[in-house]
Amino acid sequence: MTELKYVGKNSRPEDGLEKVTGKARYVGDYFVPEMLHAKVLRSPLPHARILKLDASPALQVPGVLAVITAEDFVNHSNFGWPVKDAYALAWKKVRHVGDPVAAVAAESEESAQAGIQAILVEYEALPVVSDIHHALDQDMPIIPDTEVPGTGNLTNTHLVRFGDPDPILENCDVVLEETYFFKHQEHAYLETEGALAIPEPDGGLTVYANDQSPFVNRDNLVMLLGLPTEKVRVIQAYVGGSFGGKDDIGYQIAAQTGALALKTQRPVRLVLTRTESFLASYRREAMELKIKLGASKDGELKAAKVNLLADSGGYASMTPLSSWRATVHAAGAYRYQAVHVDTKSVYTNNGYSGAMRGFGNTEGIGAIEQAVDELAYRLKRDPIDIRLQNCLTSGDVTMTGNTVNHAVDLAECLRMVRERSDWDRKRSKYASVQTGNLRRGIGVACYFHGSSLGGEGADYATTSIKIEEDGSITLTSGLTDYGQGSRTVFMLIAAEELGIDIARIRIMRPDTQTGIESGPTVASRTTMVGGNATRVAAQRLNQVLYWAAAKELKCQPNQINRHGELFYSPNEESLNFDEVASLARQMGLSLYVQGKWQMPIFTWDFDNGTGVPYHCYTFGAQVAEVEVNLESGKTQMLGVWAAHDGGRIIFPQGAFGQMYGGVAMGIGYALTEHMSYHQGYPQALNFHEYHIPSAKDIPPIDGNFIQTDHVDGPFGALNLAEPMMISTAPAIANAIFQATGKRWRTFPLTPQVILTGSDNPDLDTSDACKKGLGILA
Amino acid sequence: MKSEFTLNGKTIKVEAPERMSLLSLLREQLWLTGTKCGCDTGDCGVCSILFDGKLVYSCLVPVSELEGHQIITIEGLQKADGKLSDLQESFLRNGAVQCGYCIPSMILAGEALLLQNPNPTRGEIREGISSVLCRCTGYQQIIDAIEETARKRKAQSKNQAEKDMESA
């Protein structure tokens, strides 16, 4: 490959200037003339039938201009994918604390608040389903009221059937059977969810939203508001973090503000308060994994059986898909002779669960990586050695029975973190007797993570590139950037492929009117799928330019040589980029191109649990070093060493940012981020009850990318946003085991857990929830 | 109530309810939306501003406490010619910016720290920015950016001192 000018070189984020000057406009920063403020009346109960809902008193409140309920939408506002069980506003019943019931638009936030307080609702409280182990019991009330894939409170099932593990496990020298539990995790993006809906003169609607996927949002608005597609435009405002969290909730909010805007014919903005965000939006599912893992006495992993139970909460949201991702990763990045996984997701009244970074694999790897460590301990083997002995390499068969047919550097990742963390010395030092209250330990975990959507859905993206009259270049993508740096990645790829100065390129804001539908921006798929689409578009544009240059230079297109923006003929005559573009225009050739790229097709048989779940995988390993205070129970992070095999890195600062940010989120998940429910009432309602790490809680992170070009990636790139956090939490749990000699098999490992073994506050937060929702003064 | 204070170097007079927060005043009356709201309860720090040179949560400062004080927001950091400050540049160069929502406050946190301690260790930088939460970056590149700026400012002031010596 020729020397690259942009890919892999230090670059600045495309939208950085707006962000460091405070000029980037997030939804809450829009103040348009005549704008109304919306507030949403939300359920104070975890599970109840709505006996009576009279919204009309809200209209008597001064300043209130409109109030809406489920009846103001098509089909009672029913939406949702892959399971259509959700509502923009609750219909007939509420299924979790914070479920939206009615919404008001008013001249001020105070009037809107008074408006929702005036609404009359009569609830009949229903028994609460709060324990996932009993959600499927005969006497439990049934939560869903639409047709869902399961029966009763069963949201979905999944399975993996690779060989028959039972006879193998019977003959294993050592068999470990343990259960691992993961509490919910809140996305805790610093910007809460919001939307601004503006009615258009033609009866249509423009919505500025901080959603992940504007096209999904638009299609929901079309469906829920009964508008034609061409009359609904969704523009993604700057998004203050998402991590999987601004999908369904964003579409619900857009529908609420959209309906109010149509009703009032005024712009309407809704931005959630922090407590509302905690109560109304979904979070990472809680999950329990029962693992049976067998190995020979020399440490060779033989077979695994995993039973997985996921808490979907009041709605399905993405749990049917995230529990699938957990299912097809649950035995980890190792070779086996046989693996069975059996998964159930269940409805409860514990909020509702949905997509979050790692998407089920955070728990899948979180569990198996503790189990493998436990097995290593029983066999008196070094945790890195046992992983090196069993980890996948190119050509190996995975736990789902498919062959990894691309380069794999997992062993190299393990060796790198071993060396860089000074593992061997620290591991043996901490293994010797420690005295006093401060105990140190070092632990490791490794992962694999299927790239992009895999069996979850159609996997494509489209980029458009246009050369404008002034020689500038406009790029659109149907995939979006909520902080991960993908806009910069697209620009670097386009500039590299076109051989032009990157300063020419401008990337449009994600907008359903200018971009091209590209599926959802999820699953860390943007760099690979959107990056390839960008490359395809640039190649198509290059073809046009090479034709024009060849015609003028009287040679064949394949004889043209490029030096920066200059096009050379074999006899050294040259044209610059602007001349070539102008010639192409004179020839009548279009300087607007679209490039589409689709992941190679493969199939997963959901009924039989066999097939190929993903086209390719990323791999990585992390080491964590901790110091546990036995008196206070507090764990201090001393260091994290990370090595990831993410293909070629396009935008290094962005890639390292994903790595450090992923590690930090993993540290929070492992140690402090405690989101649980007591009888359906959440135990944390804001940032002083739910602790995300501050700069003081994060140790120095030694980040490394092993860059092996991936054959199908743009310039060899794979995806990396989600995988970065997956191995952090189990590495910490394994380090804490070395420090304390104890395993709790639960996250987060708060001081309370370390000291007493359990951290279920079981507080009655019903009044706090009412206060947080503005129902109780 | 009426209040007169200095905002980004200019004296301004406002009239607002005394219990209104500085955050609301900035965003909803003065249209300075670079200062963000993340919780409105004094927990997250993304509304931080400089109050007489100290980093303060603007959601916790009522209008009644502004009289006569110096307030600097992110909008006050750019130079008169529109150029970025060295710290802003350093944030961009070091990849410290992801979603950007905490970044105005993080930059002000860096400025507040460097005002008090021009030569901070990485540990002191961690401490100095710990009142502002960030969910994207893991803080590492933010710390890199502040550390780099401190180093450059120190080199500049050393150069300046040498020049001053020469001319004296």
Image (cartoon, helix red, strand yellow):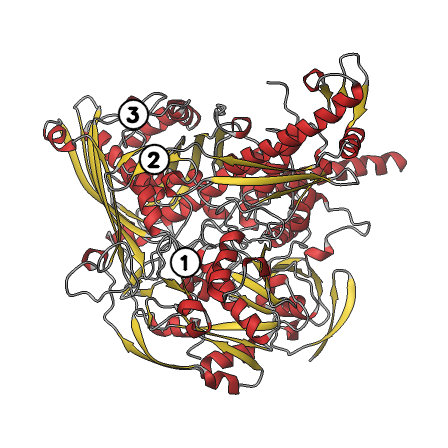
- Local crowd size for mark 2, using a 10 Å CA cut-off: few (<14), some (14–19), many (≥20): few
Instruction: Check whether the beta carbons of the residues at disc 3 and disc 2 lie within 8 A of each other.
Output: no
On screen, residue A470 versus residue A347, left or right, reads right
Say yes or no: labels 1 and 2 on the same chain: yes
Q: Secondary structure at mark 1?
A: loop
Measure the C-alpha gap from mark 1 to mark 3. 41 Å
Residue carrying label 3: A397
Q: Of the residues tagged 1 and 2, which is closer to the observer?
A: 2
Residue found 56% across the figure and 50% down from its top: B129
> Of marks 3 and 2, which one's residue comes earlier in the chain?
3
Measure the C-alpha gap from mark 3 to mark 2. 16 Å
Give the x, y percent position of residue B128. Answer: 57, 50
Residue found 44% across the figure and 26% down from its top: A420
Q: Which image quarter is the C terminus of chain A in?
A: bottom left
Q: Which image quarter is the N terminus of chain A in?
A: top right
> Of marks 1 and 2, which one's residue comes earlier in the chain?
2
